[in-house]
Image: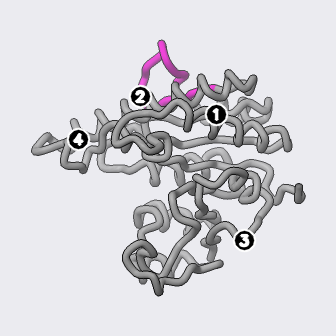
Amino acid sequence: MATPKFNRILLKLSGEALMGSQSYGIDTKVAEAAAKELKAVHELGIEIAIVVGGGNIFRGVSESAGNMDRAAADYIGMLATVMNAVVLQDALEQQNVYTRVMSAIDIPQLAEPFIRRRAVRHLEKKRVVIFAAGTGNPYFTTDSAAALRALEIQADVILKGTKVDGIYTADPVKDPSATRFEKITFQEVLEKRLNVMDASAISLCRDNDLPIMVFNMRENGNIAKAVCGDMSIGTLVTN
C-alpha cells in the first residue's frame, strides 16, 4: 500500500451511508464493513476522528419533521447522530479498535462530553473518536460540525464519504455528460453552488485552509486510498 499522506483525519460519514440498501434505519452489516475498513486505516498508524450524521433516522429539515419547530426538530436529529455513533462504536470495538464517542449534548450513559483536549488525547493514544450530536446547536448541520471539530483537533484533512466518486459539474445521475473535478477551489464550490457541504462548512474550511477530499464511501478500500492521497477516487477541495 502507498504511504499515508495524512497523519490525523476527520471522516465525515453521512447517516445515509449506514442505511445501506434499506429505506430507513441502520444496516449493521454496513456498519461492520465500514469498521473493517477503518481498522485497516487505523493499522497504518493514522489518527481517526469521525463525525456521523443522522439522516437515516431523522432530519430537522426533512418532510418527517413536518411543521415542527425547527430547533426542536434539529435536536431530535442530534439524538439520531448519537444512535448512529453508538452503533459505529460497537462495530469498531468488535474489530478490537478502541473507540470513544464524544457528544455535544450531555448523555453520560452513552457518551463522554466533548472536551477538545480530551479528544486530542484520545487520538494521541490511537483511539478512534466519534463526534456525535453535531455542534450541539440547532440550525447547524453535521457538515458544519465536521469542519468545526476538524479544526479543533487540528486534523490534516476532512474526508467526506459520499455515494459518488467526487464532485461533478452537474448531478451525474441526471446528466450523463457531467464531468468530475480532480481538484477544485473552495471559492469555485461556493460560486458554482456545488452540493458538497453546506456553505458555512466550506467557508470555515476555506478561511482556515483545511482541505476536503470527497470520495465514494461505498467502494471497498477507498478510505485507505483517500488517506494515501489517491486522486483517482475523488475530488480534492483546497484554496
Disc sitting over residue 105 in the figure: 2
Q: Which residue is mark 3?
A: 231
Disc sitting over residue 71 in the figure: 4
Tag 1: amino acid: Val
Q: Please say whether residue 134 is visible from this viewpoint.
A: yes
Between the C-alphas of marks 2 and 4, the distance is 14 Å
Q: Earlier in the sequence, mark 1 or mark 3?
A: 1
Disc sitting over residue 129 in the figure: 1
Relative vertical location of residue 123 with respect to residue 70 in this rendering, above or below: above
Residue at 77% from the left image edge and 44% from the top image edge:
41
Q: Earlier in the sequence, mark 1 or mark 4?
A: 4
The segment highlighted magenta reads 100-114
Q: Earlier in the sequence, mark 3 or mark 4?
A: 4
Between the C-alphas of marks 3 and 2, the distance is 36 Å
Does the magenta segment cover residue 104? yes
Residue at 59% from the left image edge and 42% from the top image edge:
50
**Viewer-closest of 189 and 162:** 162
How dense is the environment of label 4, judged by Cα within 10 Å: few (below 14), some, or many (20 and up)? some
Tell me the SS state at disc 3. Answer: helix
Tell me the SS state at disc 2. Answer: loop
Question: Farthest residue in the top direction?
Answer: 109
Residue at 64% from the left image edge and 65% from the top image edge:
211
Is most of the magenta stretch helix, strand or loop? loop
Between the C-alphas of marks 3 and 4, the distance is 39 Å
Tag 3: amino acid: Met
Q: Position of residue 4 (x, y in %)?
A: 84, 55
Between the C-alphas of marks 1 and 2, the distance is 16 Å
